[in-house]
């Protein structure tokens, strides 16, 4: 929910947000996952101990008859994304005000696209679901409730911080910078604040929601700075320093059977490298704000 909250708070076109987000995340994953992971994987402690920890796992083939196919799962995941992208592309091509334009603008809205995805997923997977519709809705509400609370609290916290005048002060500081210079500074500051909040309290969602609430009014007065890139910088900061106050830290630790040192080496440092790589790519993209589509 964090990235969607960022896009919503900052008024970002979700389709372009996804396009550039996928591009940046692929590069960051290659650097932090493949390159750094490859270096880490050659260490003796990972080659031996880690591999031997899984000797007790039952590797027998389980009966998958009656289960939904992998292709269906992939389709259901990407369906809302495809609808959003189609809506964005077609509204750029079709004449404004026409029936088709309004139709695809409506369907391409992130909330409508996600609702369509949820309905299609339920209908497609209904034969494989044993629980009743009421139980499914109840379980979903229980999982979504804390997210709503976190989003609301983070937005309120961001509004309180903005009431202190930090946004206006930052705008005044950057007013004399060139467009490229202001964009780079904003990207770095947004990334750093998100990173600090993530490290301080552990929740990525809180960090993203709070930081986006701080920067949304700042960007409204700086039309030459790309909200897409700033939003992605906030998200990149949220995947950085993950400490033991983060529940995800212990999920990796327990399920991977890592020691505390191994978890920090793989999860914490790896995530930080990924975030730094993403920030570097975003800074490079900011130099082409007036050239690349969808950034303004």
Image (tube, rainbow, N blue to C red):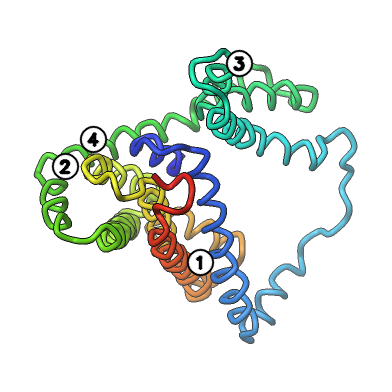
| Nearest to the observer: residue 205 or residue 28 | 28
Depth check, mark 1 against mark 4: the one in front is: 4
Mark 3 — residue? Answer: 134
Residue 262 visible in the displayed image: yes
Relative side of 153 to 35, left or right: left
Depth check, mark 2 against mark 1: the one in front is: 2
SS of the residue under disc 2: helix
Mark 2 — residue? Answer: 162
| Nearest to the observer: residue 54 or residue 82 | 82
- The residue that appears at 65% across and 17% down in the rendered structure is 133
Circles 2 and 1, Cβ within 8 Å, touching? The answer is: no
Q: Earlier in the sequence, mark 4 or mark 2?
A: 4
Mark 4 — residue? Answer: 156
Residue 207 x/y as whole percent: 33, 49
Image disc number at residue 241 = none
Alpha carbon of mark 3 to alpha carbon of mark 2: how far?
Answer: 41 Å
Q: Earlier in the sequence, mark 3 or mark 4?
A: 3
SS of the residue under disc 3: helix
Depth check, mark 4 against mark 2: the one in front is: 2
| Nearest to the observer: residue 230 or residue 177 | 177
Q: Is 86 located above or below residue 27 in the figure?
A: above
Q: Would you call the spot at circle 2 few (<14 residues within 10 Å), some (14-19), or many (20 or more)? A: some
């Amino acid at each position: 929910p964090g990235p969607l909250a960022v896009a919503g708070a900052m008024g970002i076109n979700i389709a372009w947000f996804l396009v550039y987000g996928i591009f940046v995340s692929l590069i960051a994953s290659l650097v932090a996952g493949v390159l750094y992971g490859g270096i880490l994987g050659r260490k003796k402690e990972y080659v031996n101990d880690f591999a031997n920890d899984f000797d007790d796992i039952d590797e027998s083939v389980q009966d998958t008859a009656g289960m939904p196919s992998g292709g269906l799962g992939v389709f259901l995941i990407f369906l809302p994304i495809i609808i959003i992208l189609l809506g964005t592309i077609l509204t750029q091509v079709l004449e404004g005000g026409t029936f088709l334009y309004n139709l695809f603008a409506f369907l391409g809205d992130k909330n409508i696209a996600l609702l369509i995805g949820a309905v299609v997923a339920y209908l497609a997977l209904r034969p494989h679901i044993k629980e009743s519709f009421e139980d499914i809705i109840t379980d979903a509400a229980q999982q979504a409730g804390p997210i709503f609370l976190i989003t609301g609290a983070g937005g309120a916290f961001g509004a309180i911080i903005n009431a202190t005048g930090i946004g206006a002060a930052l705008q005044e500081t950057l007013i004399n910078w060139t467009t490229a210079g202001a964009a780079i500074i904003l990207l770095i500051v947004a990334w750093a604040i998100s990173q600090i909040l993530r490290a301080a309290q552990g929740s990525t969602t809180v960090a993203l929601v709070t930081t986006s609430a701080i920067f949304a009014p700042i960007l409204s007065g700086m039309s030459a700075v790309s909200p897409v890139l700033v939003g992605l910088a906030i998200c990149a900061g949220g995947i950085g320093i993950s400490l033991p106050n983060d529940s995800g830290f212990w999920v990796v630790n327990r399920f991977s059977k890592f020691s505390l040192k191994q978890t920090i080496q793989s999860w914490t440092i790896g995530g930080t490298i990924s975030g730094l790589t993403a920030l570097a790519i975003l800074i490079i993209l900011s130099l082409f704000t007036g050239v690349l589509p969808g950034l303004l």
